[in-house]
Amino acid sequence: MLILTRKVNDSIMIDDNIEIVVVDIKGDQVKLGIKAPKNISVHRTEVFLEIQNQNIKAAESSPESLKNLKDLLNKKKNK
Amino acid sequence: MPELATKAFGNISVEPEQIIDFPEGIFGFNDHVKFALIEEGEDTPFKWLQSTMDREIAFIVIQPELFMKNSYVPEIPKSDLKLISAESIDDCIILSIVTIPENNPEKMTANLQGPILLNKKNKKGRQSISNNENHLVRVPILEQIGG
């Protein structure tokens, strides 16, 4: 991993079209600004990981549970 | 008609037009680059995205408009559309991956933060991330349909 030291208002460039600016530093929090073309996707890492973990849980859903669910929905309909 | 080993239905035959290419796989399952889209049945809104490479890897999916009270348009980066050669989101079918807890099917949820985009024109798919923070990773489906 490349590690750089930056101060507030300093920035780094990734390629010639993505700029990451250190906007503010307060205690253990760093505020970053990201200037990037619209076609670049930027996400917090934890969002990405949460979706990945949810996919893993979703893949454990069994065909039987889907059948149980259908029975449940039918019961609701018939009430 | 090629035969496919599936998690839900055993060995079944699938039509070529049911096969979707996922160039980047699905998050956490990046090796699985081909899935078959299979209907669960006529009386249900659910479908299966079944990996063609491993019968154990399959996702239950649903089109969000079939259960969401309010309209849902994921906010996705253009790069994701480009990856599946779609010009706009209108070229795509949107699917949400469903999680059904083993002993608690009524607590099932749909993932609106990580929608699946399927380009109708070329059968290419991609899991994207919606940049709208109201699009949650676990949306209770039965609450939406007033269950």
Image: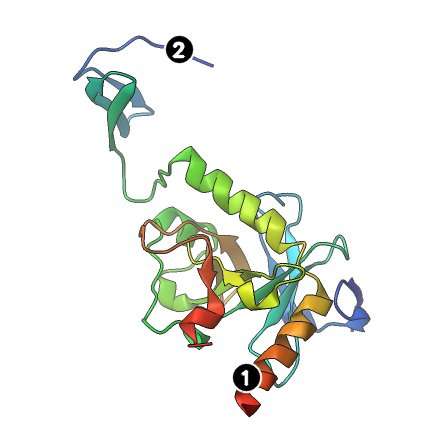
Work out whether mark 2 precedes mark 1 in sequence or the reverse, and give the earlier one: 2
Mark nearest the camera among 2 and 1 is 1
Circle 1: residue type: Lys
Indicate the secondary structure of the residue bearing disc 1.
Answer: helix
Q: Residue A46: horizontal and vertical position, in percent?
A: 44, 36
Vertical side of B39 occupied by B49: above or below: above
Q: Residue at x 51, y 53 (%)?
A: B126
Question: For residue B116, which numbered disc appears in the image?
Answer: none
Label 1 sits on residue: A76
Q: In this view, does B142 lie to the left or right of A9?
A: right
Residue B8's image quarter?
bottom right
Question: For residue A3, which numbered disc appears in the image?
Answer: 2
Q: Residue B33: horizontal and vertical position, in percent?
A: 64, 50
Q: Which residue is drawn at 77% across and 71% down?
A: B9
Q: How many labels does the image show?
A: 2
Towards the viewer: B36 or A25: A25
Circle 2: residue type: Ile
Label 1 chain ID: A
Distance Cα–Cα, label 2 vs label 1: 58 Å
Can residue B124 be seen here? The reply is yes
Q: Is residue B132 left or right of residue B127?
A: left
Q: Residue at x 70, y 62 (%)?
A: A62
Q: In this view, does B45 lie to the left or right of A66?
A: left
